[in-house]
Structures are given as structure tokens and as C-alpha cells.
Image: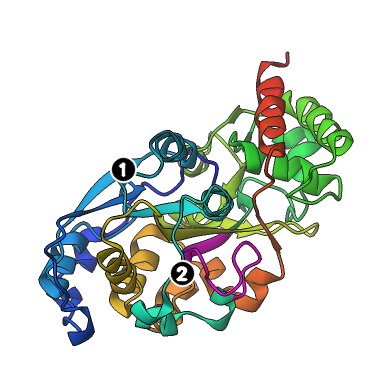
Amino acid sequence: MAFIDHKARLLGAAAAIGAGLLLAAPAALAQDASKGKIVIGNWDGYMPPDLLERFKAATGYDAELTVHATNEEVMGKVVAGGGKGYDVLFVSAPFAQALHALNLSAPIDHAKIPNLANLYPEGSQLKYDPGNTFSVPYAWGTTGLCYRTDLVEGSPDSWQALMNPPDALKGKITMLATDRWLLGAGFKSLGFSVNETDPAKIDQARDALIAAKKNLLSYDDTTFYSKLVSGEASLVHAWDGWCNYGIAENKDITYVIPKEGTDLWTDTMVVTAASENKDAAHAFIDFVLSEDVGKWVTENIMYKTPNKKAMEALDPALLEQFPNMKMTPAELLAQEQMVDVGQTQKAYSRTVTEIMNAK
């Protein structure tokens, strides 16, 4: 995602990382580690804290983690350095596409990632990279309305709840500020694509979002769910996983996808073209696709994963507590997949700046 990312919070990590998560080392991964350490670029807290230690124990490869706060941050570094210094990058789908277009990502060698078999078939049918040719999906989800059922009258089911709220909600709403998601709400409220490139439609969305601004409590990408828990906000524009953080603290919080539809976002793993140890990079991705690591992702980050074996291993009680986790791959793919918009991204960034600066 083009994001101040919503990936950094861990819930119950200590409970999930016990001795039961130690993985056996497949013989196929017992490779020569003589080429030195690989470097993984990821969001903070987006994988098990002991993952690199377990990866080394299983494969013999050393790995180092470097964290980024946003896709834009790591893209700036990768583009400036031609990808040197990184072996595997966790980035969102549009950015994986951009890396591919810039020849900064390496082809995925499926023979070196047997755990690709753990993915749902739909995990290889994503529009940004059909067949997982240059990326491997790690997590996926949707964006929608997260609200307090005890503070909101009725059941909001439209983007208009954010764009043209009733008087009782004015000053009690937050919206995401990140380019793709703020504009996405505007686009969908007008019946447009989340990947809109028509300048006239982008301007229409800008005007609608400027008009909606007067009714907001704030733009918020990081603390919106806690505002909902405290009651400072009644309705927030939210990624489904971060709505789950609120649900974990208050049973009156619920999540809904607006009737106009929403985006399907995917976070991915990419091997850099500049990597000097692509065997180790592929081995790392294979390790991440294990059932245990995928299960950790959902239990701790509160997002769904395309890892079928991991999702099937979840405690049914978790799915009952967080109903949006029960969305099937087919239901996810029924939403509009977020893809790279190329040079239009500059127009997106300019437009969001205009929205933020509008009085």
C-alpha cells in the first residue's frame, strides 16, 4: 500500500511464538550459505520476531532485517540504489508492479519455492501479477467502514456515510490520508474505479473529498481504531485488519464493505534483481510460506493471508470474533484489485496535497 502503513501493530505475539512454531528444515533448503547474509526489507512488526533465527537454523542462511514505514520510503531507496543492499522486499502490489517495470525485481523461480503450493489458487490469479511471475503474495484484505454499533444509528453501508454523513456523525468521523485510500473512497463514492486515471474524474473526487473534509474529526492512518474504542470517533475509514484491533477491545465495533464496493489490496514479497544470493532469497520466501508462519501472520497482524494451509489451521473462535477474516478468496477477488497507475500516481499525490491544504 502507498502508505503510512497499518502493519506495525502486534497483538498477542508472545502467545504465538512459542516452541510450537519451530519448523523442521526441509532437506531441499539445506543450501550453501557461503555467499553471506541476505537483507530483508519489511514493515516493522510484520513478521515473527524470531523468524530470521529460525530461517538460519533451518537453512544455514544468515538474514538481516531492515524496516521501512511506507512503500514510498523503501521505493526511494531501492530506485536510488538500483536495488543494491536488498535481497527480498515486502511491498504492496502496485509497488511490486513498479519494481518489475523498472527491471528492479527478479523473476520468481517456482521450483525454488515449493511452499507456493500452500497458496489458494486465487493467490496466483491476481491482476497485478498473474502466475506470480515477479512477486509472491503475503497478506491481503479490504478497506471499508468500521464503526460503533452503539453510537451510530442504523447500519452504514455506503461510502456516502463518510462523504455526506448525517448531522449526528459530523465531527465523529476519520478518514485515511494515504493517497490510494483517501482517493479510493472518493472514487468509489462517485462510482469510479479505485485505479482511476481520468484527470476529470480525479478532479471530481478531489472536489467531493474537499467538501467532505468539513465533517471530519481528522485524517488518521494510525490511531483511528483507538479513537473508535474511546468513543472520540463513531465511524472510521479503515483497513479491515486495523478494524479488528478495535473489535478486539470493544465488541460493539463492526466492519462493513460499502455497497458500492471497495479495493482488494495485497502485500507481496519480491526478490530484487540486484540480489547476489537469489537462492537464499527464494529459500526465505519459501520459509515464509510455511503453514506456521502464515498462521502467525493472521493471529498477530489480524489480516487474512493467501496461505490456504495457514487459514485452515486457525482456531474457528478467531474467525467468529473477527468476522471479516472469514471472507473467502472468491469474495475478496470480487472487489476491485488495486494496481499500479503509473505516472498517474504523481497526480494522486498532488491531488491529496490539494485536499489537505484546502480550507
> Which circle's residue, 1 or 2, is located before the other in the chain?
1
The prevailing secondary structure element of the residues shown in magenta is loop
Q: Which residue is mark 1?
A: 67
Relative placement, left or right, of 94 versus 267 is right
The quadrant holding residue 28 is bottom left
Give percent across and percent down for residue 210.
77, 25
Q: Which residue is mark 2?
A: 305
Which residue is located at x 46 percent, y 46 percent? Answer: 6
**Is residue 257 shown in magenta?**
no
Q: Secondary structure at mark 2?
A: loop
Count every numbered label the image shows and give the total: 2
Can you tell which of label 1 and label 2 is closer to the viewer?
1
Q: 244 or 263: which is nearer to us?
A: 263
Q: Is residue 351 visible?
A: yes
CA gap, disc 1 to disc 2?
A: 21 Å
* Magenta stretch, residue numbers: 125-141
Tell me if residue 73 comes above or below residue 49 in the rendering: above
